[in-house]
Every structure is written in structure tokens, then in C-alpha cells.
Amino acid sequence: MKRLLSTISSEVFPFDRIEEFAGNGESLEVEMDGLATARTRSGRRIWERFAEFLPVAIDGEISLGEVDTPLLPAGKSLCDYAGIGRLLLKNETLSPTWSFKDRGSLTSIAMARQMGESVTATISTGNMGNSIAAYAARAGIRAVVFVPRYAPLEKIRAMAIHGATVVRVTAPDYSVMKREVLGLAAGLGLRVVSGNGPIRAEGYKLAAFEMYEQLEGKVPDFIAVPTSACGHIRGIFKGYRELLAAGLTDRLPRMVVVQAANVNPVVSAIREGRDRIVPVTGKETVAEAITSVDPPGGDEIVLKARQFGWLAEDVTEGEILEAQRRLGLEGYFVEPAAATSLAAVSKLRAAGKIGGEDLVILMLTGSGLKDMGVFARRRVEIIESDLRNIRGEMEKILATSHRKR
Ligand SMILES: *Cc1c(COP(=O)(O)O)cnc(C)c1O
């Protein structure tokens, strides 16, 4: 048996309830019986191996070949920068549409198909819409995506490439746009999936299961997650709660809630010891993928942080760009939102909240190639040459090639 539970007041709803949130605005999560005896199976895909932990069957036909994304130790320069010796990078940019959103799209599109839906709609600053567009295309479902003006063109065009109907909306800010679109859609009977629905969170659990396998059952001390709608962080944590419930692990990791200082409704509530988030107004950040100024479901994260001893940190625009630069110099080109986790754990280490011996995982949530607009704010050096000057340039390069960085 399975059901939906509201995540603060534990109100019970039937599993096939269509809405993304409880009537009182709380986020919902799936509760399944039998987890204590759930076991892994053999299979090539993570959703095959952990099928007993998932509330919806994944039909291989809608798969875009999700891979187990790499979990690798950071190199020396990043470890030195963060002051953390055991720093691991979970590279979600290797997902089919280059962000972790694909894990949630896999389960939510599987669910949409099971319910016989012919249209699926979402509101997105980019990655969510891009991912839904691709998975809907694969499953033969029409995707409609509402995007704000500032969504990067790379992401918007990718949605259109997959045949999605893309509506770019001019509005004072993202939350106003969301409210208007959601209100109209409800009236017209168009279901809009959010970044924090219960079925998406089920997909995000897969990252926890994968890391469990990759670390051979070892649970990290901290997992840092750039947070916006709050679906990703709670999904990963739910995965670890279920591993514990099944007796496969003996403890839980502590999550690190990471936001941009300019858009930090969840982090500021945790820091100030409030129960409820207060919407942020009138600010933007270069990390456009984490710009939910008033995430429904944010209060759950605040409560969980207190209950489970999570950490929270926000990072400035300059710190974000510096972290993106440092990751690039180690071979990872991530978008600004993804780089926030590196900047945040460095600050938490410096403040003594993370220990130098702790095992820390950074979720690299999305690819840098999907947001080239950031280079209006960040200069990269390119040498201009023509065929006459190129010999001189080569000589200069060779003369300085003993120097590193
Ligand atoms: C969506 C997204 C996030 C935030 O995840 P939420 O589930 O909305 O909290 C972080 N980074 C990137 C690159 C994203 O696309």
C-alpha cells in the first residue's frame, strides 16, 4: 500500500491525488509500506535495481538512457580551496539533458503516462522545462513550458528542439508569474507539475541510491545541495531515510541547504531560527536556476534542518563566480547555481561547522554550457590572432608554459 503524507502535519491523502501540494500548502511525500523488507535487485539501471523502493513502475520505453553519474574525489586544488580533504563531486551534468532534473522527470513522466495524460505543463527557469520537454517527447506526451524572461536562451531553445510549446512570460518577478499561471491553469484544467511534487522527489531519491552503491554502503557526513524549489534536497534525504529504514545503512547524512545570498528565503529562515520562510523580493542572482523567491515546501526544509541538524549557507554573487571558475580549472564546467555548493562548504569549513576530516559530497546540479549569458559578468581570456601573428603567440605560450595557473 502507498499513500501521500503532508510533510509537516502528516495529513494522509490517497496516492493518486493529482495535486502537487496539500490543501494547506505543505509539500507532500509518498509513504510506502514494506520498506523495511525492501531489497535491491540486479539490473543495469538504477531504477531497476531499486524498483522496490519506487511507487511508480518505470517503463524502459520512456528512458533516455540515464547513466549512473560519476562520484569522484575532487582534486588537490579544490580540496585545498575548501579546506576539506575528503571532498567528492557528484556530477549530475552527465544526465540526459545535463541536469539532475532528469531523475525527477523520469518518474513524473512515468506517472503522467500511467494516468493517461496527453499534456504535461511546467513553469521553469530552464532545466526543469528542458528535462520535462525531453522526457515528454520520448513518451509521446505534449509538453507546455512557461518560462520567465531571464531564462537562458540555451535552455529555452533546447525545450523547443524537443517539440515543447514554450511560452515566455513578462512579469514583475518569478513568483508573480507563477501565481498567475497556476491560477489560470487550475481554472482551465491544465495540470502544472512543479519542481517539488511528491513524484519528482521519488526520482531524486535515485541519486541517494546511486551514491550508496558508489560508496559501497558508506554514508557521507554532509551532502551540499543548491536549493530553490526544494525538491532535490528532500528527495536525496528521503532516499537515505529509506536506506536506513531498509537496514541497508546505519545512519543519515546531514544535508547542507545552499542558496544565493540574493535569493535566500530558506537559508535565512534556518539561520534566524524562524519556522516559516519569508518571500524575498526584488533581487536577482547570476545563479538563475535557484531563484525561487517563495518556494512552497520551503517550510518543510526549515523544519527538517532543525530536526536533523542540517547546515545552511548562502553565497554572494562574487563567491558563486569564483567557485564556478575554480571548478572549471579542475575539469568541471557547471552553471553558476551548481557552483554555489562549493562556495558554501568552503565557508562552513572556515567557520568550523564542517570538520577537515568529514566526508563531504557536492551535488554538481547542472551544466555550464546551458548558461552562457553568465559570461557577460565573467571574463574569460581568449587570445586573438591571425596567421601572421600565430608564430609569435606560440612562442609566448611555450615561454610561459612552465607556469601553472
Ligand atoms: C533546479 C535546479 C536547482 C534547484 O533544485 P530544486 O529542486 O528546485 O531545489 C539547483 N541547480 C540547478 C542547476 C537546477 O536546475
Image: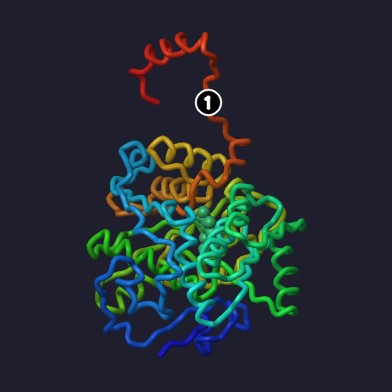
- Left or right, 353 with respect to 199, comes to left
Q: Where does the C terminus fall, quadrant-wise? A: top left
Q: Indicate the secondary structure of the residue bearing disc 1.
A: loop
Residue 47 position in % (x across, y down)? 36, 70
- Left or right, 103 with respect to 146, comes to left
Q: Where does the N terminus fall, quadrant-wise? A: bottom left
Residue shown at the point (38%, 43%) measured from the top left? 82
- Left or right, 10 with respect to 222, comes to right
Q: Which one is nearer the viewer's eye here, 164 or 184?
A: 164
Q: Is residue 86 above or below residue 78?
A: below
> As shown in the figure, which amino acid type bears the numbered disc 1?
Glu
Q: Is residue 172 above or below residue 237?
A: above
**Residue 271 at least partly seen:** no
When asked about the image quadrant of residue 36, the answer is bottom left
**Residue 369 at least partly seen:** yes
When asked about the image quadrant of residue 27, the answer is bottom right
Q: Is residue 370 above or below residue 264?
A: above
Residue 259 position in % (x across, y down)? 54, 55
How many callouts does the rendering have?
Answer: 1
- Left or right, 247 with respect to 317, comes to left
Q: Which one is nearer the viewer's eye here, 145 or 377?
A: 145
Residue 222 position in % (x across, y down)? 36, 58
Residue at numbered disc 1: 381
Residue 145 position in % (x across, y down)? 65, 63
- 10 Å crowding of disc 1: few (<14), some (14-19), many (20+): few
Residue shown at the point (56%, 51%) measured from the top left? 260
- Under 8 Å from ligand 1: the CB of mark 1? no
Residue shown at the point (55%, 47%) measured from the top left? 370
